[in-house]
Image (cartoon, rainbow, N blue to C red):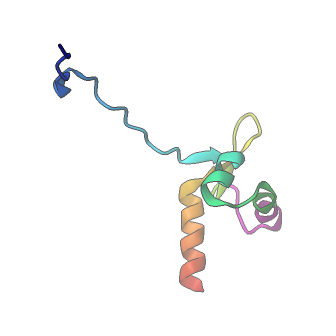
Amino acid sequence: MSEATPDIRDRPPAAVLTPARYVRVHLFEALTGYSAKAVERKIASGAWTEGREFKRAPDGHVLIDMKGYEQWVEKRFLAG
């Protein structure tokens, strides 16, 4: 005798994940393909501005603002 398939109403709701607005450089690399070195160059050259494309966390880590990055990409695309 086989067990009956559980009713979907008996299952807990699925988890909903919201993407983080700020990500550390290693995750940014995985998401976009830009290397950590490329990020460092964009910051050092002034192509990215603190408070717009990136921020520094209280512990000193560089956090990339994904909204700022997307706006930077769109600005470059529209200008090009």
- Which residue is found at the position 77% from the left and 39% from the top? 60
Q: Nearer the viewer, residue 65 or 33?
A: 33
What is the quadrant of the N terminus in the image? top left
Magenta range: 41-50
What is the quadrant of the C terminus in the image? bottom right
| Percent coordinates x, y for residue 78 in the rendering | 53, 82
Q: Nearer the viewer, residue 34 or 60?
A: 34
> Of all residues shown, which one is farthest toward the top?
1
> Above or below — where is 2 with respect to 59?
above
Q: Does residue 43 appear to the left or right of 77 in the view shown?
A: right
> Of all residues shown, which one is farthest toward the front?
1
Q: Does residue 51 appear to the left or right of 42 in the view shown?
A: left
- Which residue is found at the position 65% from the left and 47% from the top? 27
Query: Is 42 within the magenta?
Result: yes
- The quadrant holding residue 4 is top left
| Percent coordinates x, y for residue 56 in the rendering | 71, 45
| Percent coordinates x, y for residue 52 in the rendering | 62, 59
> Above or below — where is 41 with respect to 15?
below
Q: Nearer the viewer, residue 70 or 8?
A: 8
- Which residue is found at the position 67% from the left and 60% from the top? 33
